[in-house]
Image (tube, rainbow, N blue to C red):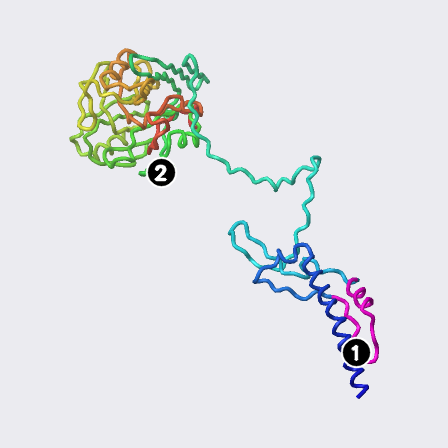
Amino acid sequence: MARKRNRRGRRISHLFLCIPLLLMMLLVTATTPGAIETLSPAASVPSPTAAPIPPVQENASVPAAELTASFMAQPAPTASGDTFSDVFVDVDTNSASAAQAPLAAEPQPVQASEPLPSDAVPAETPQPEATVYVETDPGHWEYDSGSIQVSIDRHTQGNFVYFAADIRLTDISQFSYAFANEKFSKHTETVSDIADRHDPLLAVNGDFCGFHDRGVIIRGGKLFRKQNSSRALLIVGADGKLSILTDRTEKQGLVAVRLLSEGVWHTFEFGPALVENGEAVKLHSTILRVEEGYLEPRTAIGQYADDPLHYLILVVDGRREGYSEGCDLPTLQKLFLDYGVETAFNLDGGGSTTLYYDGEVINRPASGEERKVSDIIMFMREANP
């Protein structure tokens, strides 16, 4: 009986010794920095790893002070990846995610003498270059290589601005052409985009032959179309001489065969004819408005009588209030007569009107940017070999 009482007494004393030990464990856990704040309900917290406490032997008594000192000597748990499941917020999706990851190291300041690696700066996306419209004061351009002579002057007359390009060639091959996407089709590109591939000295929009399916289209001595048409037809002969066909009642297939047999270099379907044999042609067109007062941007070509390779290009800016309103066809006709040309013919105009010289657009297209067209006329620096 005495032994049972002694055992019961020792057990009670052991119980009293454990009570302060449990209180101290709770105190240490509560005072660990960030131990509570970094946890979430979804995160599981494993028990801190601590050195084992020696078991209490039935026949041995361990002083309470010794037990307390043994526990306090153990390191407190830390919020490391080895111990806790860190909870973080994805800044891109703003959603909380639980992931096993160590805490990020404290960021180190970047020294000014150490430049950031080049790949740390994102490369800028290249922007397409806009068409540059160059105006040369006092509005005069001139070129003479011996093979080609070009003189361009910009003039203001009344309420419109126009460019007069005097062109002298030495070979008919310098009077060239090009199609959008380099093929005869309905595809379109700007005058400058087409010209940039061929490097002419001067280029203008043509007759927009890809916009319709009528007429006889010959370019560079090659036949691209032979259909009936009511438009006037400009013919560029083998020697460069201009002539105009206004009677289109004949079957145009036969006309095309005849023109090819004559060695015709180009044909352009548009009109109307403005000047023939040095005289004004009565303006008439079922396609275009020819009355006075109908102001539009214009592109037209003429030829002097002294030389079949001596041409005059007139480009009239229009639809630009405060700068140039454009001109009507009677005014355009009179301009050619004033310059003394033998033949003159109206080409596609309006928003298509573009004058390209030495790699740049030097007029002001109606909409503020170039219209895409199907074809252009080019005057090359050198003759084809």
Q: Position of residue 376 (x, y in %)?
A: 35, 29
Q: Which residue is mark 2?
A: 183
Residue appearing at x 77%, y 65% in the figure: 71
Q: How many marks?
A: 2
Residue appearing at x 55%, y 52% in the figure: 90
Neighbour class for label 2 at 10 Å: few (<14), some, many (≥20)? Answer: few
Q: Which residue is nearer to you in this view: 382 or 258? A: 382
Q: Which residue is nearer to you in this view: 15 or 203? A: 15
Which secondary structure dominates the residues rendered in magenta?
loop
Q: Position of residue 289 (x, y in %)?
A: 20, 24
Q: Quadrant of the N terminus?
A: bottom right
- In this rendering, position of residue 174 left or right of residue 333: right
Q: Specify start and end residues of the magenta stretch as a single range.
A: 50-72
Q: Which residue is mark 1?
A: 10
Residue type (three-letter) at the residue carrying disc 1: Arg
Q: Secondary structure at mark 1?
A: helix
